[in-house]
């Protein structure tokens, strides 16, 4: 009886490594949610994508490029085409948010 996993996997993952990876993903998700709540969706998207890509790739150009592309897609699709108001921040004053496009 199997649980759906391959028992003959040539590269099994150590349970501690798997636990560390799962904890890291949960931490990234919680960080994203806190950023969206605290500083709003548009700024949180830029900060989160940059930090996530830079921490995994260690390449500044790739992190900047991914951030620009992600923000561009979200801005064009949701703000320009669909006219959706993205989540406003809980902690930043309105004067800062009024300077964003």
Image (cartoon, helix red, strand yellow):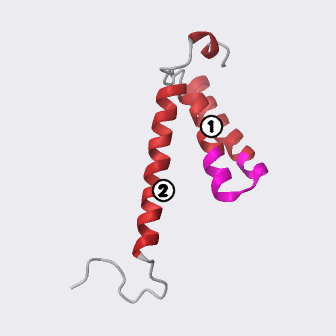
Left or right of 82? Residue 59 is right
Which mark lies nearer to you, 1 or 2? 2
Left or right of 95? Residue 6 is left
- Residue drawn at (51%, 20%) of the image: 91
Is 26 colored magenta in this rendering?
A: no
Q: Residue furthest left?
A: 1
* 97 to 9, vertically: above or below: above
First along the sequence among labels 1 and 2: 2
Q: Residue furthest top?
A: 95
* 5 to 84, vertically: above or below: below
- Residue drawn at (63%, 45%) of the image: 51
Query: Where's the C terminus, which quadrant?
Result: top right
Report which quarter residue 100 is drawn in. top right
Q: Secondary structure at mark 1?
A: helix
Left or right of 36? Residue 51 is right
What's the mark number on residue 31? Answer: none
| Residue behind mark 2 | 24
* Label 1 crowd (10 A; few <14 / some 14-19 / many >=20): some
Residue 4 lies, in percent from the top left, at 30, 77
* 34 to 96, vertically: above or below: below
Is 55 colored magenta in this rendering?
A: yes
Q: Secondary structure at mark 2?
A: helix
Residue 64 lies, in percent from the top left, at 74, 44
Label 1, label 2: how many angstroms apart (C-alpha)?
A: 17 Å
Residue 54 lies, in percent from the top left, at 68, 51
Report which quarter residue 42 is drawn in. top right
Residue 17 lies, in percent from the top left, at 46, 71
Q: Main secondary structure of the magenta part?
A: helix
Q: Which residues are magenta?
A: 51-63
Q: Nearer the viewer, residue 21 or 62?
A: 21
- Residue drawn at (34%, 78%) of the image: 5
| Residue behind mark 1 | 47
């Amino acid at each position: 009886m199997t649980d759906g996993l391959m028992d003959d996997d040539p590269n099994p993952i150590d349970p501690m490594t798997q636990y560390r990876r799962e904890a890291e993903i949960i931490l990234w998700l919680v960080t994203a949610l806190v950023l969206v709540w605290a500083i709003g969706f548009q700024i949180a998207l830029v900060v989160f994508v940059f930090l996530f890509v830079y921490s995994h790739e260690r390449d500044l150009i790739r992190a900047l490029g991914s951030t620009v592309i992600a923000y561009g897609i979200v801005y064009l699709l949701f703000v320009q085409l669909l006219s959706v108001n993205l989540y406003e921040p809980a902690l930043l004053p309105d004067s800062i948010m009024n300077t964003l496009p």
